[in-house]
């Protein structure tokens, strides 16, 4: 086992304050598409996505028509404001101040403007001018795992530093009534919103339990750029995918399992997983050969909060803190995003 290079503190999350029943979303989508040729397929697919979703804006506002500029500005301003709240809470929980932060790693595929979210966070939070900023604007659902990989790599070179990781998505802002394919309707019923922040350092921060990062892994499937993508037209940003996206975990499994065989210290005890949706989570569990308890926090987040993009793994981690593994247990943190790109971390509960 390599020497310890990074410890991840318990994250602070700001979840969308507007809770919406998935049944309401389903019935609204069906009402908006009375003559859709796949209406029954939509009804069945959305019926398999029960629970609730957490939005950063009221449902009526999410589904309302907006021009491109207003949608972009509203999305960025909301994530920016919520990022300050999450980062402030994370620092307070760790007993640190903005002056203690040496590097910020930010991931957001929805709050993508120039200057970026990281630069605004430096100003809003009052970080030192010399604070290093690392931004991921295209990692999307893999952003949580990749941000932690970047934090660990930074600490390997600067072990005395403290890294603030901030991951936030306003996925419901991608709602477009004109997107009408079956896949489009599924994503409308699956999205949720959240911003998460945590501190990563080469030393444990405080006395609370933490994750120790043992190994990291990244893998991109060649020629799969169409499986998940965001595109922009005169109506604004849209998210799209193909049915081939369902195969992504299966296609990644050989490389992931090979890495685990070489580095895992025996059977894994817990999972912090975000492969996208419930069906792909089931496929990942099968590929890993783990039981339902291993994925229960991931499934609960999807059921109660929705697909939160890169912030999902931090909501799963927050739930794991409530019912913690045993000290010394090793687990897997995994994120899957466009590209198709995956990132994973072998972690130990300390």
Image (cartoon, rainbow, N blue to C red):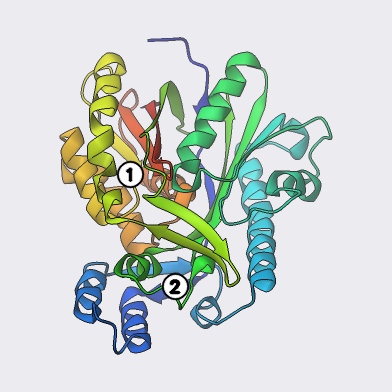
Q: What residue is drawn where x is 31% and y is 84%?
A: 30
Q: Earlier in the sequence, mark 2 or mark 1?
A: 2
The residue pinned by badge 1 equals 323
The residue pinned by badge 2 equals 19
Q: What residue is drawn where x is 60% and y is 71%?
A: 234
**Could you say where residue 300 lies in the image, as x and y percent from the top left?**
30, 56
Q: Nearer the viewer, residue 241 or 50?
A: 241
Q: Nearer the viewer, residue 317 or 172?
A: 172
The quarter holding residue 308 reads bottom left
* 107 on left or right of 212: right
Q: Callout 1: 10 Å neighbours few (<14), some, many (20+)?
A: few
The quarter holding residue 331 reads top left
Residue 223 - label: none
The quarter holding residue 270 reads top left
Secondary element at tag 1: loop
Q: What residue is drawn where x is 69% and y is 63%?
A: 77
**Could you say where residue 168 lies in the image, as x and y percent from the top left?**
56, 52
Q: Is residue 339 above or below residue 151?
A: below
Q: Callout 2: 10 Å neighbours few (<14), some, many (20+)?
A: some
Q: Quadrant of the C terminus?
A: top left
Q: Is residue 29 above or below residue 309?
A: below
**Could you say where residue 322 lies in the image, as x and y percent from the top left?**
38, 46
Q: Is residue 70 above or below residue 86?
A: below
Q: What residue is drawn where x is 65% and y is 64%?
A: 78
**Could you say where residue 159 lies in the image, as x and y percent from the top left?**
63, 16
């Amino acid at each position: 086992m390599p020497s310890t290079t990074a410890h991840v503190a318990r994250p602070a999350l700001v979840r969308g304050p507007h809770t919406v029943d998935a049944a309401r979303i389903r019935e609204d989508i069906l009402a908006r598409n009375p003559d859709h040729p796949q209406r029954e397929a939509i009804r069945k697919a959305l019926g398999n996505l029960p629970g609730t979703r957490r939005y950063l804006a009221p449902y009526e506002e999410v589904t309302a028509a907006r021009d491109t500029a207003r949608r972009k500005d509203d999305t960025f301003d909301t994530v920016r404001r919520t990022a300050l709240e999450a980062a402030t809470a994370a620092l307070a929980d760790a007993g640190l101040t903005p002056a203690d932060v040496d590097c910020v790693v930010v991931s957001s595929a929805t709050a993508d403007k120039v200057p970026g979210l990281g630069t605004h966070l430096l100003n809003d939070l009052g970080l030192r001018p010399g604070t290093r900023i690392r931004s991921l604007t295209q990692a999307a659902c893999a952003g949580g795992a990749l941000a932690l990989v970047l934090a660990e790599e930074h600490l390997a070179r600067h072990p005395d530093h403290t890294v603030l990781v901030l991951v936030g998505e306003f996925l419901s802002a991608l709602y477009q009534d004109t997107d009408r394919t079956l896949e489009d309707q599924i994503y409308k019923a699956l999205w949720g919103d959240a911003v998460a922040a945590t501190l990563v350092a080469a030393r444990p921060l405080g006395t609370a339990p933490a994750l120790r990062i043992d190994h990291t892994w990244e893998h991109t499937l060649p020629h799969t750029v169409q499986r998940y993508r965001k595109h922009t037209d005169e109506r604004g940003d849209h998210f799209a995918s193909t049915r081939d996206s369902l195969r992504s975990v299966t296609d990644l499994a050989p490389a992931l399992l090979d890495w685990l065989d070489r580095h895992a210290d025996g059977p894994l005890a817990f999972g912090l997983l975000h492969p996208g949706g419930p069906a792909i989570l089931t496929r990942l569990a099968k590929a890993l050969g783990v039981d339902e308890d291993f994925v229960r926090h991931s499934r609960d987040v999807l059921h109660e909060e929705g697909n939160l993009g890169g912030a999902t793994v931090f909501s799963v981690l927050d739930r794991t803190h409530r019912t913690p593994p045993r000290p010394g247990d090793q687990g897997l943190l995994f994120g899957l995003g466009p590209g198709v790109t995956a990132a994973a971390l072998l972690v130990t509960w300390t």
